[in-house]
Image (spheres, rainbow, N blue to C red):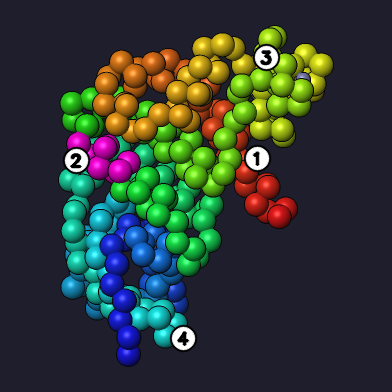
Amino acid sequence: MEYYTTLAFVLKQEPVREHDRNYTFYTQKFGKINLLTPGARKINAKLPGHLEVPSLVEIQFTMSQNPRLVSALEKFSFPVIKKKKKPLLVSFLIVDLVDKLTIENQIEPEIWKLLYDSFYFLEENFDKFPEIADFLWLYFNAKFLEILGLFPFLEGCVECGKTINNRFFSFQKKGIVCPQHHQEQDWPINTQQKRILNLLFNSSLQQFLRRSQVNEVLKEKKYLKRFLDEFTLAIKSDIMSS
Ligand SMILES: [Zn+2]
């Protein structure tokens, strides 16, 4: 039988029947994959704690009729993230978003890199700067949507290109709108919110090693969180209807 090896992050695990368990991984070489671990109790005894969010593991599996997990070797456990509630919660939000908006066996190196960089960024910076957890969730959500090809159009009215008086955002049209193209369900958006959305969608993680940049984003934490929730929803309905 042929075996495959790759680095992976666990997205979720579910019990299947009485003794089996189904693991969903996001892998470096194969994208998202589902693997069955028959008699997971036995295997779990060999792998204490390895298959937890957000551990980085090297997995070995078979691709036969029913793809199965053969072994998992822990490469990094992210001890800082795991010992605190907040960064762990953010890690679960991240893996849940990836699980919900990706399909199996589609290789997307940018998603792998975003996951990898985000978890390490959180691990390395949380102790000296706890606000990074809130920031990282906003950043991950924005960048992930961008990788899926969806970002807010903020340069001018998304319908006519007009650049003044655009005080509303249309989730349906995915951009700001002028008074003429504004509809009732659109959200108000001010200059600061536009600027910070731009910063979030157009900056690399390295640019946020400066505390001032992170605090700049967190000025609009509430708005961004609601905005990204709504934007993610708009995208989910696009995926469903396509
Ligand atoms: Zn317009």
* Image quarter hosting the N terminus: bottom left
Numbered disc 3: secondary structure: loop
Q: Which quadrant is home to the C terminus?
A: bottom right
Decide which of 164, 22 is in the foreground and name it.
164
The Cα–Cα distance between marks 3 and 2, rounded to whole angstroms, is 45 Å
Examine the image and state in which quarter residue 87 appears. Answer: top left
Which residue is at 22% across, 39% downward?
A: 123
What residue is rendered at 42% in x and 43% in y? 93
Q: CA distance from mark 1 to mark 4?
A: 36 Å
Disc 3 residue type (three-letter): Thr
Q: Are marks 3 and 4 in contact (CB under 8 Å)?
A: no
Give the mark, 2 or 4, whose residue is nearer the N terminus.
4
Give the left or right position of residue 44, taking residue 181 as reference. left
Q: Is mark 4 within 8 Å of ligand 1?
A: no
**Distance Cα–Cα, label 3 vs label 4:** 56 Å
Residue, disc 4? 65
Mark before the other along the chain sequence, 3 or 1: 3
Mark 1 — residue?
A: 234
Which picture quadrant has residue 191?
Answer: top right
Chain part drawn in magenta: 117-124
Res. 80 in view: yes
Residue 112 image point, x, y percent: 37, 53
